[in-house]
Amino acid sequence: MLTDAEKEKIVTIIENMRKQISSLWGDYKREAESNLRAKDYGSELYTNEMIDNMDRLFEKIIVVQKTIDLLIDFLAGKISISEEETLRVTDHSCTIVIKQHEALIKEHEDRRAQIKARLERISLMKSLMKSFLQQLEGAKLKN
């Protein structure tokens, strides 16, 4: 459980991060305006580097916003650090079950491959028998 002082620190961090987002949006808008002016004038200054700069700024905004969302969820009690060990054990159990199922699937795939191979042999044998019978009937008719 968080103390009030810890909660206040997190709220302060969120506020600072929101200011950082505002600053990044300002940088993004200035970069966009500069890029538009360069593009409108047909300037050779409009390059992929300018577009990359905007992309990097936007990615930073997304990362900071995701961090803010995570902190807000933590404060709201939607994320509990104390459940980490339980989740790790459950995750490990799921991994074991998945591996068991994968092994079972492999066994069934192998068995199915064997069945298909036998069916192919039976089909080939039926075709050969049919051919032999037709040859025998043809030989009887000639005699």
Image (cartoon, rainbow, N blue to C red):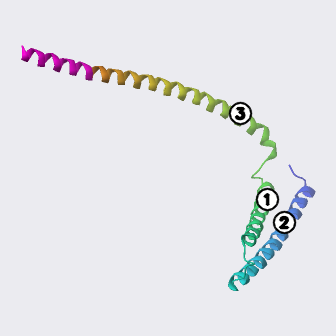
**Which residue is at a point 66% across and 34% down the rendered structure image?**
94
Tag 2 residue: 17
Q: Hey, what amino acid is under mark 3?
A: His
Is residue 54 positioned above or below 140 on the image?
below
Q: Which residues are magenta?
A: 127-143
Is residue 126 positioned above or below 47 on the image?
above
Q: Confirm or deny contact between disc 2 and disc 1 (CB under 8 A).
A: yes
* SS category of the residue bearing label 2: helix
* SS category of the residue bearing label 1: helix
**Lateral position of residue 134 relative to residue 57, left or right:** left
Residue in front for this viewpoint, 34 or 26: 34
Residue in front for this viewpoint, 91 or 60: 60
Residue 32 lies, in percent from the top left, at: 73, 77
- Whether the magenta-drawn stretch holds residue 25 is answered as no
* SS category of the residue bearing label 3: helix
Q: Hey, what amino acid is under mark 2?
A: Met
Is residue 2 positioned above or below 121 on the image?
below
Q: Earlier in the sequence, mark 2 or mark 1?
A: 2
Residue 51 lies, in percent from the top left, at: 72, 71
- Whether the magenta-drawn stretch holds residue 137 is answered as yes
Tag 1 residue: 67
Residue 78 lies, in percent from the top left, at: 74, 52
Q: CA distance from mark 2 to mark 1?
A: 9 Å
Q: Confirm or deny contact between disc 3 and disc 1 (CB under 8 A).
A: no
**Which residue is at a point 32% across and 21% down the rendered structure image?**
122
Q: Hey, what amino acid is under mark 1?
A: Thr
Q: CA distance from mark 3 to mark 2?
A: 35 Å
Q: Residue furthest bottom?
A: 41
Circle on res. 92:
3
Q: Confirm or deny contact between disc 3 and disc 2 (CB under 8 A).
A: no
Residue 121 lies, in percent from the top left, at: 35, 21
